[in-house]
Image (spheres, coloured by chain):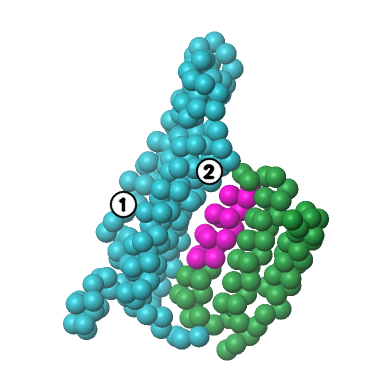
Amino acid sequence: MIPVYILNTLIILGIVVCAVLTVTVKRTLSSIICLAGCGAFVSLEFIMLQAPDVAIAEAAVGVVLTTIIFVVALQKTGGKGEDEK
Amino acid sequence: MKKNWKRDDLIVRSLADSYLPIALILGFYVILHGNISPGGGFQGGVLAASGVLLLYLGYGFRGIATALNMERMHRLEAIGAIAYVLFAMLGIFAGYNFCRNILWNSGEIGDLWSAGTISLMNYAVGFKVLTGVGFLLLLIINLLSTEPGHEHDGTIPTTELEEGGDAE
């Protein structure tokens, strides 16, 4: 079995990497996907901290709803961000 | 990135058809088991309300505008809030404090029906969040789709009508 602290460290590293990628990535769609990955890692971290209630809320709101709303808004506004015009 | 995304895609529509019952069943399961397992009214309501987004991804705004009624959802949300307050005030009517369970010994600990009126309040919260978040999503999608110049999402989701060429 993997020790718990190694798994915890990996999940926190995933959160940090996804958050940094969200800011630094050029394309807006990639940024949205990185934000969804950050939400998924945060949800896993909530499970590690034994709060499955908050994990369900984070997975439902932070991963599904905001991602689809962002993608739909991006599609409606022409599909290009500020940097790629 | 392509400028015009294809709205009437068969694969997207089939996947939306397949995942809609799963989302609804998972949401109602979480609402129903809110008193004995992780989750509750809010989480289950949001999970079930993501079915609105699946409908939108599959069928466009015209599809969900024919399937769902925004005025009725707005009224049902108010009914859910009123039901929550009424179920919570049953404790006051019975002589105790607000949000108090008044049905003791209504089941074994760990059963589905073991929480008395607390589970009824939980269902009311789930109903309110389901209709409220669904109304919110419909409002956002409606505001986004009334922008001029993006007429491609108003097509009726059958391929025969799409072949005809007039997408209104």
Q: Alpha-carbon distance for marks 1 and 2?
A: 22 Å
Contact (Cβ within 8 Å) of mark 1 with mark 2: no
Q: Which chain is green?
A: A
Instruction: Report the residue marked by disc 2.
Output: B42
Query: Measuring 39% from the left and 46% from the top, which residue is drawn there?
Result: B74
Query: Measuring 44% from the left and 68% from the top, which residue is drawn there?
Result: B144
The residue carrying pointer 2 sits among few (fewer than 14), some (14 to 19) or many (20 or more) residues within 10 Å by Cα, namely many
Q: Is B150 on the left-hand or right-hand side of B30?
A: left
Secondary structure of the residue carrying tag 2 is helix
Q: Which residues are magenta?
A: A54-69
Of labels 1 and 2, the one closer to you: 2
Identify which residue, B49 or B109, lies in the foreground: B109
Magenta-drawn stretch contains A66? yes
Magenta-drawn stretch contains B124? no
Residue A53: where, in percent of width, then height? 61, 44
Res. A12 in view: no
Q: Amino acid at mark 1?
A: Asn
Query: Measuring 41% from the left and 80% from the top, which residue is drawn there?
Result: B5
- Quadrant in which residue B97 is drawn: top right
Q: Going from the N terminus, do you reach mark 1 or mark 2 first?
A: 2
Instruction: Report the residue marked by disc 1.
Output: B69
Mark 1 vs mark 2: same chain? yes
Question: Which subunit holds the residue at mark 2?
Answer: B
Q: Which chain is cyan?
A: B
**Which label is found at residue B37?**
none
Q: Is residue B110 above or below residue B133?
A: above
Residue B89: where, in percent of width, then height? 50, 21
Secondary structure of the residue carrying tag 1 is loop
- Quadrant in which residue A25 is drawn: bottom right
Q: Is residue B61 above or below residue B112?
A: below
Residue B105: where, in percent of width, then height? 51, 15
Q: Amino acid at mark 2?
A: Phe
